Amino acid sequence: MIIVMQYHASDEEIGNVVAHIREAGLQEHVSRGSELVIIGAIGDEDKLDQARFEVLPGVERVTRVAKQYKIVSRVTHPAGSVIKIRGIPLGGEQIQIIGGPCSVETPEQMALAAQGVFDAGCSMMRGGAFKPRTSPYAFQGLGVQGLEYLKEAAGRYNLPIVTELMDVRMLDTFMEYDVDVIQIGARNMQNFDLLKEVGRVNKPIILKRGLSATISEWLMAAEYIAAGGNHNIIFCERGIRTFETAYRNVLDVTAIPVLKKETHLPVIVDPSHAGGKAWMVPALAQAAVAAGADGILVEMHPNPCEAWCDADQALSPDELKSLVTTLGAIARAVGRSL
Amino acid sequence: MIIVMQYHASDEEIGNVVAHIREAGLQEHVSRGSELVIIGAIGDEDKLDQARFEVLPGVERVTRVAKQYKIVSRVTHPAGSVIKIRGIPLGGEQIQIIGGPCSVETPEQMALAAQGVFDAGCSMMRGGAFKPRTSPYAFQGLGVQGLEYLKEAAGRYNLPIVTELMDVRMLDTFMEYDVDVIQIGARNMQNFDLLKEVGRVNKPIILKRGLSATISEWLMAAEYIAAGGNHNIIFCERGIRTFETAYRNVLDVTAIPVLKKETHLPVIVDPSHAGGKAWMVPALAQAAVAAGADGILVEMHPNPCEAWCDADQALSPDELKSLVTTLGAIARAVGRSL
Amino acid sequence: MIIVMQYHASDEEIGNVVAHIREAGLQEHVSRGSELVIIGAIGDEDKLDQARFEVLPGVERVTRVAKQYKIVSRVTHPAGSVIKIRGIPLGGEQIQIIGGPCSVETPEQMALAAQGVFDAGCSMMRGGAFKPRTSPYAFQGLGVQGLEYLKEAAGRYNLPIVTELMDVRMLDTFMEYDVDVIQIGARNMQNFDLLKEVGRVNKPIILKRGLSATISEWLMAAEYIAAGGNHNIIFCERGIRTFETAYRNVLDVTAIPVLKKETHLPVIVDPSHAGGKAWMVPALAQAAVAAGADGILVEMHPNPCEAWCDADQALSPDELKSLVTTLGAIARAVGRSL
Amino acid sequence: MIIVMQYHASDEEIGNVVAHIREAGLQEHVSRGSELVIIGAIGDEDKLDQARFEVLPGVERVTRVAKQYKIVSRVTHPAGSVIKIRGIPLGGEQIQIIGGPCSVETPEQMALAAQGVFDAGCSMMRGGAFKPRTSPYAFQGLGVQGLEYLKEAAGRYNLPIVTELMDVRMLDTFMEYDVDVIQIGARNMQNFDLLKEVGRVNKPIILKRGLSATISEWLMAAEYIAAGGNHNIIFCERGIRTFETAYRNVLDVTAIPVLKKETHLPVIVDPSHAGGKAWMVPALAQAAVAAGADGILVEMHPNPCEAWCDADQALSPDELKSLVTTLGAIARAVGRSL
């Protein structure tokens, strides 16, 4: 921790900061510049509370040096982690595409969707049974019945399933239905009780980035899961909130190389929720793979115009197929495969 | 709903949009301008799904006209609601100050805090027993024991208590302890399962604004609570996330008059979390009252330097007392009382 | 400057950083923690280029310690500056209100406007002769003729005039017309050539904050003016750009106490451009004065519905009069006068 | 234009809006829904001022329907424009790479830079002679001498030159030196006097996006240039300002497909200023080409560690060469060439 003292800090104030550092079992380094005094606290920084130094008299500002995330940090696992989902590797040389509808609607829709996902060459299937909706009057998902439809449809093609968990009380049901990958949505990225619960199971977790979550907060949210014992975490960039109103969110491709540097865990991208319009999806998915994403989570509906939810952002089966072909070419251009 | 057609939309495309409007039981109004065709859908707009019109061929964009929030809208209750908390009116002519520490620590700390809150002239007491923390390694609150300490300390001065609920599974405990006002934190503003649960109880709910929630999303989050039957909702502005790094959040005072126009429910402000530094709190609290806030939720600690959490943002008892005096003068300057 | 080395930085890399520090004539302090090595550079930090240290092998990140603004910093002038505008003090105990229309339209409009400004108790008059408009097809202002109308109308009541300069080539004309206060608009806050030019004249400058300028960038923009020799700079907060779409900008009241702490120069607020609607203006102006602003720059039009520009944000003469009365009461509540 | 009336708008208020529409020479369409009245104004919308309708009694809100940009709109030129720069086509099937240092330093540096740019396979060379710097105390560029060095170095390889214009008074000099492409920087995107001036010359203009400019404002800024008669405009996305602090800016790749849909003009990307670190540049440049960019503007320095400006974001000659190879492979994957 580095403490910068105010311009006219007194020797007494400096001594007081030093006393607090020693009290916590660390050592101080006092650097007296021509204008400013800077104090470094050497030792286990986690024993110090930044806010308590900031209120000490004469302190201008305090900066942490060590990173607060430990288990998810690449420092602990320089090689990069590959997460296996029913044998399918995520995070390695091969890129994975997860396709499927925004929400599970009917057995017929799911049957067609599963066929489209399989035919396009996707390796996993997504579908929402519990839907976080801005309005209480909007369709909230089929619930447990949706899990059944999804499992049944995906099972015919042996596709692992990915679906969102919103409520801690539903986790047991997800385990009973043997959901292959549990998704934590953007609005729940800092629902800490939910993070703690999924940290106690052994299922891979897709952790979507909060609408305005910093990279650091996102890593800390993953650390909540990891601290519980579940290290199978997949980061999913899905667009951030900015001032721009011409599209729903701004897909933050810079997050991809930055996360790959900071953490050993895989990073995938959801281009459907980012732009919010189907015609933007190919450009965004292509950008994601070109920037180094380990996979793509994309919405496809057998008949987009009839979708019960987010109809405007789903690709048709043919559009998905065409996109996967292009993504394969880009993957090869950047030294990977699909 | 208003549908703007693309520049070269065909008659067939226009006819298709009209057919969809009629199918939903509404009527169309087609306006043919020199360059553009605009179609209005007249009737109960809630029967239409905006996204499904956006994917129809030839459609440029679609705008909802009616507001999606109903129960919380001022239209339904033009006079403004006053919420009574053990007899204390919130939302009327009188401004209420809720003071107390960020987190409940010890019985001694709470006893001193309660005395300071009472002496300063606050009408309610806050204190966190369950704490949402960015890091899993930070102090997470005393839990149920914290509720006890808070209730005990506030009870001596007959101050109603305000405390945060993070987990649906804890709601019964909150009801058993007869928490007077349940706070939903910024990170849970769109935790829809939690909102639904607190919609089923009869306690006043303070709904903090999400870090990057729009006014519209915030009103819809309140509508989730209201739709469950609990109309005792208090909005709490606590700063939004922007590009500025010189302070933690930007207190959005414009939200105050805008909310007062859109909803009949009370609006309070938390100046402590907004700025993140104790020395900014008075200016922000003063601005809030001057802009029309119905109350202030402010952090005070008997000994800020020793606080276990957010030590840098708590006022001392004396600072709180002085602030309340100034707030009273500002309240009178804008035709209210304290 | 503080250099944090990477986790596994070698002794050679550390030696290289130290060599660069010494080469620039500064001294190093090397702190070896249990996990990290931190190097402080002691001496005149302005001799070091942060970016060149960031590319040295083994460096994790580099933080400047000293502030880059010097002349405008409160450190150089702890008491606070009062700027005199034809004898009217800005920045002291008394709050000043500058009123007038968005744009100068006709001599008749300006005559009525000046009367309204004077009657309401404002001490200066504003009016735009050169208008920055998003669209090239929108009214661009009357130009030099507008200066004449403004000067003539304000002169009748001996009100100093405030008007915006957009183009360096117009500065001589502004000097000829003896404009009392030159305004630099938000879009030109980092038009560095313009800043340099107004740094060479002796007129007070109102420097509006850029739409997404940080406090630090804003202070540096003022430093550009100050470095040229003109220290009569007035900061004007006018709302920042965020994700919120319910109002044009978010008035950042936190900027007021933060600027007052960082700089000795006066800080005023423009509540009209912030919210963008006349009905929001009183709440925002009141918040600004309560938070410590030294003045208010507010739009008034003798007949708002007929204004040629931003008709929806101008107060009527009566509304301005009523607002000034309330602002006076708030000023007294916070220990100032009007 | 669409005018939504307030919930309880009277017939008189509706009549007043209609009267204003007719007065401007347009026709009204009044749609009376079960709850709301909506009025459409049919005809030349440019004759109406949105703000003046927003202040009429009983009006809830007003929405423009027609787009305000005309010349730059794709509607006027559906095929897409190809801009020729000394015979090099920008905006067609072939992608162009513009490389070079942030700032022009010495003849030796420029000679090495030009060689590196040419060897890597770039088709144009960039270099800053006039530098917009946040601090008045930072290196401000070599000025006219910099133009000379740039022209001389690039000339040896017959590379067209790209350089930034900050001050209207320098335009004549740029014309004398026959600068091939004039760059308008992010901070000057809404320097309207500068836009007007470059609208009067026949040189291609690279218009960088402002730090927080919306797509719509950016298109309007281009319309300023186009309205003056210069239609050779190239949009350059260079990252936007958000809440994220882990990197300098967020490269907005969504802007690429959206601009390509809205305008017929070419769109290029600057990956160097976006991320702010050299190690992020390849991922961002790759994403840009994959998303459909027509070109890349990238910083390269013969010796990055010795660069006078932004040393941390320049690629080395070898890194540039390697990047161009990868970009070629991605271009082919998306059906283009390099």
Image: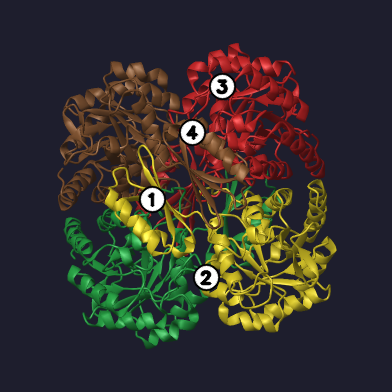
Chain colours: A green, B yellow, C red, D brown
Badge 3 density bin: few <14, some 14–19, many ≥20, Cα 10 Å: many
Q: Amino acid at mark 1?
A: Arg
Foreground mark, 1 or 4, reads 4
Spatial CA span between label 2 and label 3: 51 Å
- Above/below status of A11 relative to D190: below
Locate the N terminus of chain A and report the quarter of the image it occupies: bottom right
Q: How far from the left and from the top, in percent, is residue A150?
A: 32, 79
Q: Chain of mark 2?
A: B
Secondary structure beneath label 3 = loop
Q: Mark 1 = which residue? A: B61
Spatial CA span between label 1 and label 4: 21 Å
Spatial CA span between label 4 and label 3: 22 Å
Q: How far from the left and from the top, in percent, is residue A177?
A: 36, 86
Q: Mark 3 = which residue? A: C129
Is the residue at mark 2 from the same chain as the one at mark 4?
Answer: no
Q: Chain of mark 1?
A: B
Badge 4 density bin: few <14, some 14–19, many ≥20, Cα 10 Å: some
Secondary structure beneath label 4 = loop
Badge 1 density bin: few <14, some 14–19, many ≥20, Cα 10 Å: some
Is the residue at mark 1 from the same chain as the one at mark 3?
Answer: no
Q: Amino acid at mark 2?
A: Asn
- Above/below status of A259 relative to C229: below
Q: Mark 2 = which residue? A: B191
Is the residue at mark 1 from the same chain as the one at mark 4?
Answer: no
Q: Mark 4 = which residue? A: D48
Spatial CA span between label 1 and label 3: 37 Å
**Front residue of this view, candidates B166 and D229:** D229
Is the residue at mark 2 from the same chain as the one at mark 3?
Answer: no
